[in-house]
């Protein structure tokens, strides 16, 4: 993991130089992946790395963990509470939609959760413009393969340093970097709603996804979940589909 971490740090430094920006920033959620990214960008740019806490009806424990990551990694800190912004925006949108017969109540929770992710993305890019920083993504190989991210939300980033590492490898890298034990051990959750966990929402475990990506045998039902998620989310991993004129 030392070599992997050193390689990522060098890659981050080279990319920032090529892009002509000042540094790097990440939204810190209190989870493992954003913690590892925080430690990596601080190593790459000790004086030009920023961790942003974006509470939005958030679990207080996640915010406490996020604060601990920022303090222990040594990156700069900024906190912007988006709770009121989200509540106003979503109540306005859903209020209008509920007047339409096509409104589907069962999609309400997910739509609100995705708006949270997209508000956070917009906030990060507004901050990035002021600092002239790049926004660093936190997706690992498992999340990327099954499309477990919000399009133009937490998937809306400039660079992805962890996208070729399994969840277990990210955990091992976090251990090497010094991420606090309670974050290494906590159950993965995107914090989209109360009691939400990644694995319950996905329908299988990160260990099974990691094993699948490593070419190992896993139960058929888990394989089916993974492959179906990969097919269904292909659009998330591609640029916007373009129409090509037939006369060109």
Image (cartoon, rainbow, N blue to C red):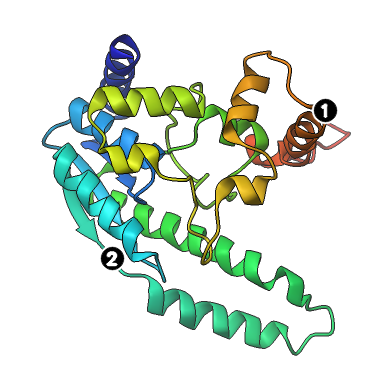
The local secondary structure at tag 1 comes to helix
The quarter of the picture where residue 85 lies is bottom left
Label 1 or label 2, whichever lies nearer to me, is 1
What residue occupies the far left of the structure in this picture? 47
Q: Is residue 9 visible?
A: yes
Label 1: how many Cα within 10 Å (few below 14, some 14–19, many 20+): few
Tell whether 35 sits left or right of 107: left
Tell me: residue 19, above or below residue 106: above
What residue lies at 35% left-to-right and 14% top-to-bottom? Answer: 4
Earlier along the polypeptide chain: callout 1 or callout 2?
2
Q: Is residue 134 visible?
A: no
Task: Write down the residue under mark 2.
Answer: 80
Horizontal and vertical percent position of residue 29: 37, 51
The local secondary structure at tag 2 comes to loop
The quarter of the picture where residue 16 lies is top left
The quarter of the image holding the N terminus is top left
For marks 1 and 2, give the CA distance: 44 Å
Tell me: residue 56, above or below residue 10: below
The quarter of the image holding the C terminus is top right
Task: Write down the residue under mark 1.
Answer: 220
What residue occupies the far top of the structure in this picture? 3
């Amino acid at each position: 993991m030392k070599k992997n971490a050193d390689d990522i740090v060098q890659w981050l430094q080279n990319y920032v130089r090529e892009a002509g920006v000042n540094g790097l920033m990440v939204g810190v959620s209190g989870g493992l992946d954003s913690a590892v990214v925080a430690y990596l960008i601080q190593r790459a740019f000790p004086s030009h790395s920023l961790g942003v806490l974006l509470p939005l009806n958030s679990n207080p424990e996640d915010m406490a963990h996020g604060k601990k990551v920022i303090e222990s990694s040594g990156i700069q800190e900024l906190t912007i509470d988006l709770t009121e912004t989200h509540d106003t925006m979503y109540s306005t949108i859903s209020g209008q939609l509920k007047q339409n017969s096509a409104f589907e109540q069962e999609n309400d929770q997910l739509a609100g959760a995705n708006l949270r992710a997209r508000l956070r993305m917009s906030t990060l890019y507004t901050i990035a413009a002021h600092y002239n920083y790049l926004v660093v993504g936190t997706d690992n190989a498992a999340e990327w393969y099954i499309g477990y991210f919000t399009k133009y939300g937490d998937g809306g980033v400039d660079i992805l340093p962890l996208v070729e590492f399994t969840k277990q490898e990210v955990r091992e890298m976090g251990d090497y970097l010094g991420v606090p034990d309670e974050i290494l051990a906590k159950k993965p959750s995107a914090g989209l709603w109360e009691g939400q966990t990644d694995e319950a929402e996905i329908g299988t475990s990160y260990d099974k996804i990691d094993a699948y990506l490593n070419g190992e045998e896993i139960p058929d039902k888990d394989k089916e979940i993974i492959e179906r998620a990969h097919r269904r989310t292909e659009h998330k991993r591609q640029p916007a589909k373009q129409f090509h004129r037939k006369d060109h």
